[in-house]
Image (tube, coloured by chain):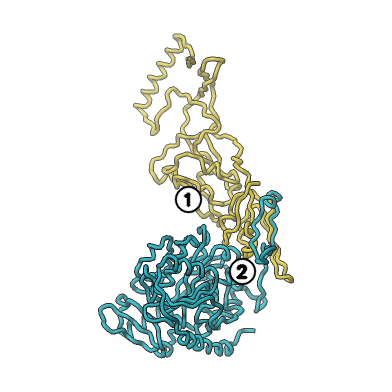
Amino acid sequence: MKKVGTPEYNLQDKLKYHLSALSTAAKQVALPLNITTHYPRERRRWPDCFRGYILFDPERCISCFQCSFICPANAIWMKEAPSNRYYPTLDYGKCIFCHFCVDSCPGGALKPTKIHDVAYRTMEEMLTLTEEMVEPPEIIREDKVFVDYVIDTEDLSLKRTKGRDNLIVEIAPSQGVPMVSQCVDRASCIACKVCEKVCESGAVSSIKDEERLIVKMAIDAEKCTGCGLCVKECSMQILRLVRK
Amino acid sequence: MLHANIKTGEEVIHMATPAEEELGESKWEVKVPEKKLKDKLFFENLKAVVIDTNLCSRCLTCVSICPSGLIVTDEDIVGFPDFEKNCFDCGACVRVCPRFIYEPPSGLGNYIEIVAAKSKRFKGQDGAMATELIASAIDMGMIDQGLFVDRNEKWETSIFHVRYPEQVGVGTLGGTKYVFAGILPALKEAIRFTKKGVGVVGTPCMISGIRKLQQEFPVFKEKVKLVVGLFCTENFHYNDLMKFLRDEKGIEIEKILKTNISKGSMYVTVAGAEKKRKIKMAEFEERGLVAKGCDFCTDFTAVQSDASVGSVGSEAGFSTIIVRNENAKEVMAFIREKGTAEFGEKVVMDEIDYLIKFKKKREEHIKELKLPE
């Protein structure tokens, strides 16, 4: 059987921790905070893939609505920005932190963080606007130590490290299955060029041949990111995503 | 991409094969129609040639195909608000409009057989055979969805999707409506979700629109399996017709049970009244209630359909059916086998011929028409 090893304290440490506990309680009686105080003032170090607060990078967003379509809790609503582009807003009153939106984002515009303890005063505040999603929220951090469970040959032991854990992680965007857009019924194409208009990566091109009265349509498989915007918008529904 | 089938010589749809997909080969060419008025948008062409000349039959084929989805009908006139700004200029509307390059169909058309029949399952205007054809096609698994025009108490039309023959039992599905209905936009939605195919009932102008769609786009050719045409002399604008019946004839719209036209008069059956109200067609024509596009229509029997159905030519309570091709013949054979319809004695061809000739006279209107150069 494996045991979780606990650090051994001497009398001096024990005294110190007891005093610290008493002073924390006294402080809370005199000046209560509006969130639960950490005690002891240490955090578990969460893994990098922790599903917490979601950050948003407008530069990488292609307004494909994928996040709002996939959200099982219907927490993501798209809002029109002054640039006529649509960006997500996230209602944390509904969010179930499944991070389907993060995984489905083709451009990697939604990024996960380890922040999980944001406090709100009202329900309205929980609706996070696009602008508020760009920067991490302000949270009260009293932690000075983070703890890790490490497997030490046979036993699990608790390791304390002084300092603060970085809650913002740099994680590579989810790749998924590489897909590419294809036209499956070319004779039914009406050359309305909606696909070309919506394509963010410039993969769809059309050249009009005035003399022969022909429009040459082409999808560049190299440039196509497989975001599926054109598939969604095609008026004849003849585009499909296929595996690259 | 269309390729000829080596054995039959028929054009077949070419789907991208897995090998091609692997190669990432996705280049294709789309033919664009020629503009009658150069330097103008395609919708402007359609407007000048078809809509402004009153040639438009309001079959709504253009509404169904427009990728912007902004072609609408306002007061029974097809229009496109702000088309200068929103038109994609793709030419789809011009490609599918049956009257942009108008080859008016007329006569009796090709047929395999002409029979009189009466449905045992359904009750309709006459023999309810249009309903029976679609219901039997669903039963035999040819189609999995039928599109019907339903009406409410005020005789406003809406589209009803039928998936099981039992659904056709709704009282207002059968019967002539004499006002326009947007069956083609509903058809485009229906072909997206159908697995086996779709069956449609429509007036001759709608049938022409469907055939044009099928000719231009294989996706329609593949998915629209049974097209039932109705005998049609003319159609009316909803608002004008209802206003006329209510204000001038004093008929309560909600109480109308049935309308039918025969021998130059419209007969309106009203609940509670013993006698049918008779209104001469001349009265409608005087007031300009007949849709203007119908002046240019010479097709009485819907010659382009798979099967045409109407009351003309058979005795009261029976429908005349003109079976035109193999699809419809199969359905008729199924009906005979299951015995869901009672077959009549004979069809009086003179009555049908009379109306065919009556509509053929409208060719003069087309000759008089001045199209913009």
**Rendering coords of residue B136 (x, y %):** 44, 65
Instruction: Say if A36 sits above or below A241 in the image.
Output: above
Q: Nearer the viewer, residue B335 or B130?
A: B335
- Pointer 2 local density, CA inside 10 Å: few below 14, some 14–19, many at least 20: some
Q: Nearer the viewer, residue B245 or A82?
A: B245
Instruction: Say if B221 sits above or below B316 in the image.
Output: above
Disc 1: host chain: A
Task: Identify the colour of chain A in the image.
Answer: yellow
Residue A54 visible at all: yes
- Pointer 1 local density, CA inside 10 Å: few below 14, some 14–19, many at least 20: some
Q: Nearer the viewer, residue B317 or A187?
A: B317
Distance, label 2 to label 1, CA atoms, is 39 Å
Callout 2 amino acid: Glu
Callout 1 amino acid: Trp
Query: Are circles 2 and 1 on residues that touch, CB within 8 Å?
Result: no
Task: Identify the colour of chain B in the image.
Answer: cyan
In which image quadrant can residue B44 be found?
A: bottom right
Left or right, A228 with reference to B185: right
**Rendering coords of residue B112 (x, y %):** 53, 75
Q: Nearer the viewer, residue A151 or A235?
A: A235
The residue wearing badge 2 is: B216
Q: Residue at x 57, y 87 (%)?
A: B366
Instruction: Say if A28 sits above or below B206 in the image.
Output: above
**Rendering coords of residue A202 (x, y %):** 67, 54
Residue occupying the far top of the picture: A11
Q: Residue at x 46, y 66 (%)?
A: B334
Disc 2: host chain: B
The residue wearing badge 1 is: A77
